[in-house]
Amino acid sequence: MWKQTFNLPFAFAVFAAKPDVKMEYIKELNSILMAGINSIPTMKFPEVHQINDLPSYFKKNISYHLDENKKKAIQLFISEVDRLEL
């Protein structure tokens, strides 16, 4: 519904850091994130899910990189929350 309404992706979750965090920590966290993403094909998932092939779902249906459109979507979400006084 979000994408249809605003023609922007929905950023479900974001790793964020305060401006004064050392770049070495940010690089390490990004490295850990990439290691997790790259290990999706070898992860073991329970067979109880309605999605038959969870590794493919996680690789094809979820975008893990914060790009400009996602940044716009986050700002729009925040402004909508403010506008609706939620």
Image (cartoon, rainbow, N blue to C red):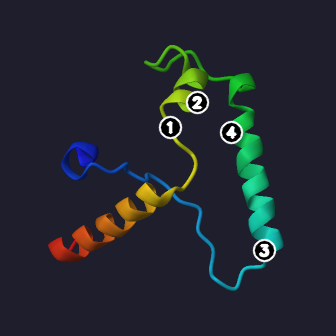
Distance between the alpha carbons at the discs numbered 4 and 1: 10 Å
Distance between the alpha carbons at the discs numbered 1 and 3: 26 Å
Q: Amino acid at mark 2?
A: Lys
In the picture of the structure, the residue carrying the numbered disc 4 is: 37
Distance between the alpha carbons at the discs numbered 1 and 2: 6 Å
Residue drawn at x 63%, y 23% as measured from the top left: 45
Distance between the alpha carbons at the discs numbered 2 and 4: 8 Å
Residue drawn at x 55%, y 16% as measured from the top left: 53
User: Would you say the residues marked 1 and 2 are in contact, meaning their CB atoms lie under 8 Å apart?
Assistant: yes
Query: Mark 4 or mark 1: which comes first in sequence?
Result: 4
In the picture of the structure, the residue carrying the numbered disc 3 is: 23
Q: Residue furthest left?
A: 84
How crowded is the residue under tag 4: few (<14 C-alpha within 10 Å), some, or many (20+)? some
Quadrant the C terminus occupies: bottom left
| Rendered location of residue 36, percent (x, y) | 72, 41
Distance between the alpha carbons at the discs numbered 2 and 3: 27 Å
- Does residue 79 appear left or right of residue 73 in this picture? left
Q: Secondary structure at mark 3?
A: helix
Q: Secondary structure at mark 2?
A: helix
